[in-house]
Image (cartoon, grey):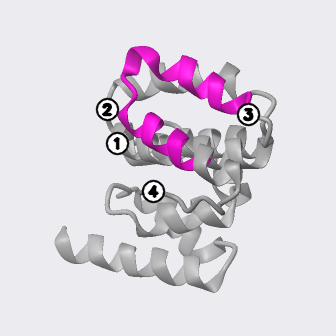
Amino acid sequence: MELDDDEPPEHQRYADYLRALEAVTEADEAGLVEEVLRDEDPAMADSAVALHMERRAADLLTDPRFDRWARTMTPLIADRGFLTRRLHEWTLLRAVALGEPWVADALLGATDWFQRMASTTQIVTSSDALTLLAERGRTRRVRNAAGRRLLELERSA
């Protein structure tokens, strides 16, 4: 995607970062993330890294490499509140999806984004998590979605 010459330079850098992050190898990922986060526009840098993290976390969600990836990303984003919270929520989503231990307060205290993901993604089959979200999810949308997922699971059992 070519940007117009009238586009602000941060738009071009953002597009360049996204292309580079999409193509980065596992071995070079941490270095590139660090480079992006050093950009002079922190909001743009955070946005590029957030999109990258969404892609990687979704791809690795049930993969054993997820834990290593999350440990690698943690110190790189430690001073970025949004990115840190999002990585924490991907880790929580992974725990729920894999049937690993999780805490109800973490589920209920998570962002609307997390609650929507947990209540709509097919990978989450925990009736405990879905029941909790159906009964006490933050929004009606979450409660309804979790209730529908519970019904789907009951029908397929």
Q: Is residue 94 visible?
A: yes
Badge 1 marks a residue whose secondary structure is helix
In the rendered structure, does residue 35 fall within the stretch colored magenta? yes
Graded by Cα atoms within 10 Å as few (under 14), some (14 to 19) or many (20 or more), the crowding at tag 3 reads: some
Q: From mark 1 to mark 3, how far is it between C-alphas?
A: 26 Å
Q: In this picture, which residue range is highlighted in magenta?
A: 14-38
Q: Residue at x 57, y 76 (%)?
A: 142
Relative to 44, residue 4 above or below? below
The residue identified by callout 1 is 59
Which quadrant of the figure contains the N terminus?
A: bottom left
Q: Residue at x 54, y 20 (%)?
A: 30
Q: From mark 4 to mark 3, how far is it between C-alphas?
A: 21 Å
> Which callout, 3 or 2, points at the residue further toward the start of the chain?
3
Between 45 and 90, the residue placed more toward the observer is 45
The residue identified by callout 3 is 39
Q: How far across and down, in percent of the image, does residue 78 sit?
A: 75, 27
Q: How far across and down, in percent of the image, does residue 87 sit?
A: 60, 39
Q: How far across and down, in percent of the image, does residue 19 sit?
A: 43, 42
